[in-house]
Image (cartoon, rainbow, N blue to C red):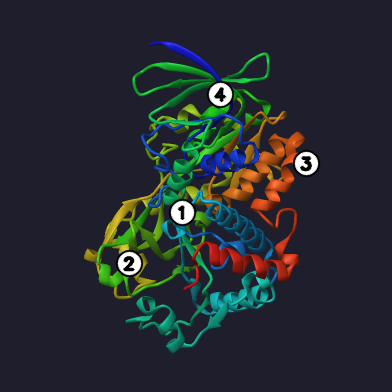
Amino acid sequence: MSNKQTSTDVILVGAGIMSATLGTILKELAPDWNIKVFEKLDKPGLESSNEWNNAGTGHSALCELNYTPEKNGVVETSKAVNVNEQFQVSRQFWSYLVENGHIQNPEEFIKPIPHLSMVQGEDNVAFLKKRFEALSKIHLFDGMEYSEDQETLKQWIPLIMNGRTSSEPIAATRIESGTDVNFGSLTRILMSSLEEQDGVEATYNASVENIKQNADGRWEVKVKTADGKIITQTAKFVFLGAGGGSLHLLQKTGIPESKHIGGFPVSGLWLVCNNQEVADQHHGKVYSTAEVGAPPMSVPHLDTRYIDGKKALLFGPFAGFSPKFLKTGSNLDLFTSIKPNNIFTLLACGAKEMGLTKYLIQQLMLNKKQRVEELRKFVPQAKDEEWEIVIAGQRVQVIKDTDKGKGTLQFGTEVITGANGSVAALLGASPGASTAVQVMLDVINKCFPEKMNEWEPKIKEMIPSYGKQLVEDEALFKELHASTTKSLKLED
């Protein structure tokens, strides 16, 4: 083994959608900076960002019912508005990349598709109607329709309505302006564009073994390459965007912000339709309500995706458990993440989340036949032989001490930043990829505050709504929604 030491401006660990987005933004803001990317696997976008592992909805809160909880009889819309705003930022940035030649064919990663919410039972129907009334007043959700009419629902969701014999009330909302985003494809497009630029180098089959801060404030990253050599690379700024692998690396930094944080791995399974004729009968992303006690990321949905250039139909996700933090990780990942500084945080979470533990055990015990029975609540005529199980990606939910108490399980996307902004790590899950541009802008703002005045004009060129709330400016929203629809070729 040899040890080769080099220096760079930025190191990105992991070649997923987050690193690809951050690298792309930074290269626009600081073209002369040198960027090194280290990815454990042999290609970009193979773990959490991959199209079979990622929810891939283009989360814009058009159909995700868990973003609009009902409290004291009132549907809260603030989270839905926030997620929608963030997705509009992503659309603007992708449009900028198309218009400036970094993305040649947007249809390779984004396509128009209706987003629907579908519920069954009187209470759920009443909730959906309230949700529709609340969101219809907000221009971010223009075009949303509501129906309880059987004939209308047969047109919207024929596969779900065919053969339905239950007399239980059923209702749906639909909004045509939804999208399907293939984040695996987008990651590959962004990384390919990045690697063509001067000063950017990506190394694959390269595992980051250690990270520590030197006396001069620079970070020293030790990387093991495919041939067993150890490279020592230093950088002013390091971003840990390695999915579930980020937690271990964050712990190696030793920064105070890495203490009292743990991770809870949750895996998932999809049922995937293997009969193309059946898959072609459904056109939309249909989300419903989660089972009582189920975590937010287990909201069931029947989901049209475009994968490898053709329509695919997925149902799920069914929750599972594996101690691995990555799909390609180690069965020791969970155990090696337990440290003296986070053990009480983890134990407190375990005591509080007995309901989640019970739910996961129940999910793990389901066989294929039972999973197809769950699917039949959506698709009454589903046949066992037309669906097969595909293992989805690993998600590591963050556990940390918050105002809500010790050992609180977080279900969103978390960015942990060192006090001086020289290191940042991305942890957590949904809405994740869909809000990557906004999340990475937040990282840049926290980590490079001294540069923001200089960079702001360029950021506004890339994201015209930067610094504004689209929910407060209907004219600007409509203008940008129309222009991004055109740039991204989303006219149906």
Looking at marks 1 and 4 on the same chain, the residue that comes earlier in the sequence is marked by 1
**Residue that carries the numbered disc 1 in the rendered image:** 104
What kind of residue is marked 2?
Glu
Residue count near mark 1 (Cα–Cα under 10 Å), binned few <14, some 14–19, many ≥20: few
What kind of residue is marked 1?
Gln
- Residue 240 lies in what quarter of the image? top right
> Can residue 322 be spotted in the picture?
yes
Q: Where residue 252 is drawn, which disc sits there?
A: 4
Please indicate whether residue 218 sits to the left or right of residue 107 in the image: right
Secondary structure type for disc 4? helix
Instruction: Measure the alpha-carbon separation of dots 3 and 4.
Output: 33 Å
Q: Kindly identify the residue that appears in the image at 58 percent across and 63 percent down.
A: 484
Residue 236: x, y in percent? 64, 25
Instruction: Measure the alpha-carbon separation of dots 3 and 1.
Output: 31 Å
What kind of residue is marked 4?
Lys
Q: Kindly identify the residue that appears in the image at 36 percent across and 34 percent down.
A: 42
Instruction: Measure the alpha-carbon separation of dots 2 and 3.
Output: 56 Å
Q: Where residue 373 is drawn, which disc sits there?
A: 2
Looking at marks 3 and 4 on the same chain, the residue that comes earlier in the sequence is marked by 4
